[in-house]
Image (cartoon, rainbow, N blue to C red):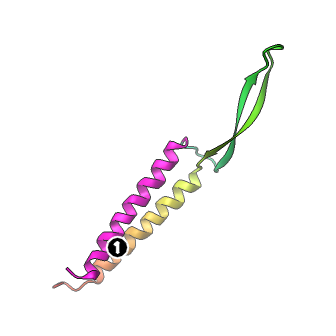
Amino acid sequence: MSTTSKLPRLLRGAALVVGLAASGGWLATGAHLGWTQTSVVQLQRDEITGIDFPVRRAAFVAGVEVLAAGLLLAGGLGATALFLDRRRPAGA
């Protein structure tokens, strides 16, 4: 097996890994349909007055642009693998 036939297989595998990692990371951090957030607002209740007030805490929530960039990269890797497969001679 030559090196040129290993490269498309490697690129397809990399495309799969990148696509799954982007999707899994986006789902694991909350599947947020907006932009990426680096903090989250939570409501807490004052014990004495009973009034709710917002508190901002640090948290990473991946946005839809993280998902789109990962899937775009995976698509580019997959397209490159298909292009390299088509360039290979028929007898190879």
Q: Position of residue 23 (x, y in %)?
A: 46, 51
- Residue 13 on the magenta segment: yes
Give the structural element (helix, strand or loop) at label 1. helix
Q: Position of residue 18 (x, y in %)?
A: 43, 60
Instruction: Name the residue beneath numbered marker 1.
Output: 81
Residue sitting at x 72%, y 27%: 43
- Residue 16 on the magenta segment: yes
The C terminus - image quarter: bottom left
Crowding around mark 1 (Cα neighbors within 10 Å: few <14, some 14 to 19, many 20+) is many
Name the side, left or right, on which 43 lies relative to 70: right
Q: Residue furthest left?
A: 91
Name the side, left or right, on which 44 lies relative to 48: left
Name the side, left or right, on which 24 lies relative to 64: left
* Count of marks overlaid on the render: 1
The N terminus - image quarter: bottom left
Residue sitting at x 28%, y 82%: 4
Up the image or down, 83 lies above or below 73; here it is below
Q: Which residues are magenta?
A: 1-30
Disc 1 marks which amino acid?
Answer: Ala
Q: Position of residue 39 (x, y in %)?
A: 69, 43
Up the image or down, 46 lies above or below 76; here it is above
Examine the image and state in which quarter residue 46 appears: top right
Q: Position of residue 70 (x, y in %)?
A: 50, 60
Name the side, left or right, on which 20 lies relative to 89: right
Up the image or down, 92 lies above or below 25; here it is below
Q: Main secondary structure of the magenta part?
A: helix
Up the image or down, 71 lies above or below 56; here it is below
